[in-house]
Image (tube, coloured by chain):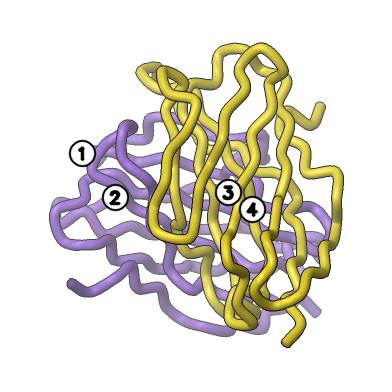
Chain colours: A purple, B yellow
Amino acid sequence: EAGVTQSPTHLIKTRGQQVTLRCSPISGHTSVYWYQQALGLGLQFLLWYDEGEERNRGNFPPRFSGRQFPNYSSELNVNALELEDSALYLCASSYSQDQPQHFGDGTRLSIL
Amino acid sequence: DQQVKQNSPSLSVQEGRISILNCDYTNSMFDYFLWYKKYPAEGPTFLISISSIKDKNEDGRFTVFLNKSAKHLSLHIVPSQPGDSAVYFCAASARGGSNYKLTFGKGTLLTVNP
């Protein structure tokens, strides 16, 4: 069974630019979650998508947004990049709230 | 407000001995708890979970204990192996609602010495 896949693995951007990160969930999983792991802050919940709808959002500004496609893959968009957006962005998927979330290896985003 | 706390940033044990990783939580609505292991440059890997209706769950060398009255859970690894050296994250959730999410602790770095 293929795991959660994320692309790209690394990305370098400058302040003010926009970025799109991509995630393909495990086959059969309908829920996709996005987390940010910034240095020293642990994993912070960003967004939850299920059946194409945004179900919950963490304490992040509106310039963090995303969507889920009919095949359950997902994109995370970040506009007007700031230096503090430098982090590892992790995507996870699950069958349901009663099942564990499984993570991809993340996208390392560096803002110069 | 840190709802899930792992108070030990690091732990060092000898190969073959028991590793005990601890986690405390404050939100009484949490009803599902998980442990993840993370190697550098990889995403977190799910290890074991426990529902609030249980107080113990075992899977091979890994056992998770839940003490609801103390709002405390622990992960026991017996016997510890050098390949267990990684950062371990505790996570918790309150299932069944529209605000479902995983809340993570900051992690404990486990080093198992040969």
| Residue at the disc numbered 1 | A51
Residue A36 at least partly seen? yes
Element marked by disc 2: strand
Q: Amino acid at mark 3?
A: Phe
- Identify the residue at horizontal 49%, vertical 25% (top origin): B55
Labels 2 and 1 within one chain: yes
| Residue at the disc numbered 2 | A68
Labels 4 and 3 within one chain: no
Position of A14 relative to B93 (above/below): below
Report if the CB atoms under discs 2 and 1 are less than 8 Å apart.
Answer: yes
Task: Give the CA separation, mark 2 to mark 4.
Answer: 27 Å
Chain letter of the residue beneath label 2 in the structure image: A
The part of the image, by quadrant, that contains residue A14 is bottom right
Chain letter of the residue beneath label 4 in the structure image: B
Q: Nearer the viewer, residue A48 or B28?
A: B28
Q: Bin the neighbour count of mark 1 within 10 Å (Cα to Cα): few under 14, some 14-19, many 20 and up.
A: some
Residue A18 at least partly seen? no
Taking the view exactly as shown, the residue that stands out farthest to the front is B16
Element marked by disc 3: strand
Position of B25 relative to A70 (above/below): above
* Coordinates of residue A52 in the picture (x, y in percent): 24, 41
Q: Which mark is residue A64?
A: 3
Of labels 2 and 1, earlier in sequence is 1
- Identify the residue at horizontal 61%, vertical 17% (top origin): B68
Q: Bin the neighbour count of mark 2 within 10 Å (Cα to Cα): few under 14, some 14-19, many 20 and up.
A: many
| Residue at the disc numbered 4 | B89
- Identify the residue at horizontal 31%, vertical 40% (top origin): A99
Chain letter of the residue beneath label 1 in the structure image: A
Q: Amino acid at mark 2?
A: Gln
